[in-house]
Image (cartoon, rainbow, N blue to C red):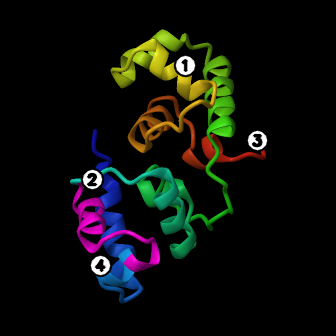
C-alpha cells in the first residue's frame, strides 16, 4: 500500500527548508536512494524514520502523512510496539470492531494483527495509516504513550 499524499508533502517540506534529498537522507541516517524512494512512493517509511522527519519538520504525523492539512506542531513520541498495540486495541474496542474486520481491511491474517495489538511487533506504517484513515483516528493518537 502507498500513502499517496505523504510523498508530495515530504518533497514540499524538504524544498521549503532548502534541503537536498542527500542532506535529508543524512539527517535521518538513510542512503539518498532510500530517501528518494520515500519521496517518490517507491519505499514505505518505517515509523522510526517518519518520527525523525516529523521531528525535523516540527509537524504532526497526521500532517506529514496527509491525514490532516492542519499544520499541527510536532509532539515528542517514542515509537513503542506495546504502546501502539494498546492504542490499537483501545481504538478497536472504542469503535466496537472485531479484529477480523481490521484484518480484512488490511488484508492480513489474524495472527499478524494480534502481534501488532499485543505489541510483539511494530505495525507497518501503511497499516497504521489505513487504520487511522478508515476509523477516523489519528496517527499521533495511535502512537502516543500518553493516551
96 part of magenta stretch: no
Question: Mark 1: which secondary structure?
Answer: helix
Q: Local crowd at mark 4 within 10 Å, few (<14), some, or many (≥20)?
A: some
Q: Mark 3 points at which residue?
A: 147
Tag shown at residue 13:
none
Find out whether the residues at labels 3 and 4 contact each other: C-beta distance under 8 Å: no
- Residue linked to disc 2: 43
Q: Nearer the viewer, mark 2 or mark 3?
A: 2
Judging by the rendered image, the residue that carries numbered circle 4 is 21
C-alpha gap between disc 3 and disc 1 = 20 Å
Question: Measured from the top left, where is residue 21 in percent x and y?
Answer: 29, 78
Q: How far apart are marks 2 and 4 (CA)?
A: 14 Å
Q: Looking at the image, which residue sits at the far bottom? A: 18
- The boundaries of the magenta stretch are 26-41
The quadrant where residue 121 appears: top right
> How far is the residue under mark 2 from the one under mark 3?
30 Å
Disc number placed over residue 114 in the picture, else none: 1
Residue in the image at 74% along x and 45% along y: 145
CA–CA distance in space, label 1 to label 4: 36 Å
Q: Does the magenta stretch include residue 32?
A: yes
Q: Which of marks 2 and 4 is nearer the N terminus?
A: 4
Amino acid at each position: 500500500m502507498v500513502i499517496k499524499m505523504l510523498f508530495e508533502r515530504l518533497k514540499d517540506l524538504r524544498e521549503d527548508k532548502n534541503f537536498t534529498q542527500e542532506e535529508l537522507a543524512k539527517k535521518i541516517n538513510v542512503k539518498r536512494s532510500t530517501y528518494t524512494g520515500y519521496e517518490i512512493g517507491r519505499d514505505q517509511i518505517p515509523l522510526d524514520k517518519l518520527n525523525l522527519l516529523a521531528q525535523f519538520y516540527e509537524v504532526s504525523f497526521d500532517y506529514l502523512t496527509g491525514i490532516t492539512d492542519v499544520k499541527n506542531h510536532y509532539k515528542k513520541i517514542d515509537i513503542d510496539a506495546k504502546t501502539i498495540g494498546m492504542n490499537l486495541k483501545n481504538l478497536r474496542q472504542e469503535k466496537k470492531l472485531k479484529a477480523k474486520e481490521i484484518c480484512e481491511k488490511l488484508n492480513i491474517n489474524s495472527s499478524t494483527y494480534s502481534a501488532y495489538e499485543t505489541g510483539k511487533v511494530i505495525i507497518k506504517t501503511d497499516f497504521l495509516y489505513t487504520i487511522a484513515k478508515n476509523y477516523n483516528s489519528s496517527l499521533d493518537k495511535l502512537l502516543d504513550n500518553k493516551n
